Amino acid sequence: MKLNNLPSEFQEALPILKKIREAGYEAYFVGGSVRDVLLNRPIHDVDIATSSYPEETKSIFHRTVDVGIEHGTVLVLEEGGEYEITTFRTEDVYVDYRRPSSVSFVRSLEEDLKRRDFTVNAFALDETGLIIDKFNGLADLEAKLLRAVGNPAERFNEDALRIMRGFRFAASLDFDIEPDTFTAMAAHAPLLEKISVERSFIEFDKLLMAPFWRKGIKAMITSQAQKYLPYLENAHDNLQQLLDDLACNYHFKTSEQAWAALLLALDVKDVRVFLKAWKTSSQFQKDVEQIVAIYRFRLENELDKMEMYRYGSCLIEQAEDLRAGYGLPVDFKRIERLDKELTIHDKHEIVINGGVLIKELQYKPGPELGQVLKEIEEKIVLGELANDKEAIFDFIRKENK
Ligand code: ATP
Ligand code: MG
């Protein structure tokens, strides 16, 4: 198959392929961008694979960065862009199921394509627009099927992350998983316990954010693979419930919201412990925890100024959007209004602070001062006290603080 019109992202990178060829090597576009152009999907990051070894690649171009030279990847800065150029590699040997124990560079394109996960991810595209399809990926694209390259059992045994990637691509592409591939995914799912949680998180997160996330979750729970992921051992029914209860056209707007929905569906008590096990950042843990807290608060209460102030409109909107997904009543106008009515959004906006009270009203540092400041903050937020030095001092004197 030949593409007549290469999209601009490839056009711009053609001089790179040409330079490599003129130096006596082969170079092709590979990976997700080739799949995406065949599916008429927008392209991001154009990956290039070459028969030149990393040192050889570096000698061809003026400006390069060693971004992953041990894996054969050199970043080339040219034609106004950045291109990752990776030497053809054979299947890496994954001794501990975590990371490749060695990377072998080879000169053959076919060897490189063989180590790729799914047939639709194993195309190469040359300078003339010719699609090289060694594993019948075009037929699978047509049939919207995810099929492992080669023997599926071997491929998932080599790298169990491919199991997560399978669910993720089902979710992003709306593809079904070919039956033998699916059987092998389910059979090798226990190996998910051995791969790094960070890698699983990235794929799971992409799955949740994908347009057909339901399809990914459905495939995951049908295969029972969730059993081997942190704190999801017994999650089958709760995940099914999530699919049943959320509106069928619902999409998560942010990763934080998606993970909050997951935790709510699982009725997790300690959000931090769960997300720590998934090795997420503390900022992420904090934001998810707050979305969960807002959602739970809202099951029994209306939002008011104090919650607007405490959580901020961004997290509140995410929790409310999730409520809408569950068919619960929401009032975004009210949130907007409450947010507008807030005289302060942060305690640093208060015109006085502890230092001022110590200096001007002879307060002593300590818990009592903390208590007074907290009370002032609350009164200002609720609109019961003006954010004005005189008014605050009056209040302190009147209340005999
Ligand atoms: P996306 O559009 O989300 O970037 P992608 O297909 O480009 O999807 P990447 O993770 O960017 O996925 O990987 C680029 C390519 O590298 C894949 O298309 C696939 O050919 C190969 N690949 C990546 N990870 C693996 C893996 N664990 N096993 C085998 N091949 C892989
Ligand atoms: Mg990619």
Image (cartoon, helix red, strand yellow):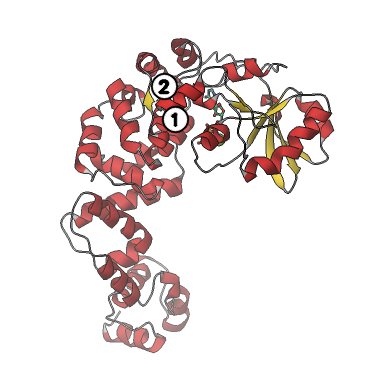
Number of on-image labels? 2
The circle on residue 200 is: 1
Q: Is the CB of the residue bearing disc 2 within 8 angstroms of ligand 1?
A: no
1 or 2: tag closer to the N-terminus: 2
Q: Secondary structure at mark 1?
A: helix
* The label number, if any, that marks residue 192 in the structure image: 2
Q: Quarter of the image for the N terminus: give it.
A: top right
Looking at this view, is 226 or 380 the one in front?
Answer: 226
Up the image or down, 101 lies above or below 312; here it is: above
Answer left or right for 88 relative to 57: left
* Image position, residue 132 (x, y; %): 61, 23
Screen quadrant of the C terminus: bottom left
Q: Is residue 374 left or right of residue 242?
A: right
Q: Quick check: can you spot residue 312? A: no
- Identity of the amino acid at label 2? Leu
The residue positioned 20% from the left and 36% from the top of the image is 241
Contact? badges 1 and 2 (CB < 8 Å): yes
Q: Nearer the viewer, residue 46 or 94?
A: 46
Q: Name the residue nearer the viewer: 99 or 110.
A: 110
Q: In the rendered image, is residue 239 in sight?
A: yes
Q: Amino acid at mark 1?
A: Ser
The answer to whether 222 is drawn above or below residue 393 in the figure is above
- Furthest residue toward left: 300
Image quadrant of ligand 2 equals: top right
**Can you tell which quarter of the image residue 347 is in?**
bottom left
Image point (48%, 27%), residue name:
196
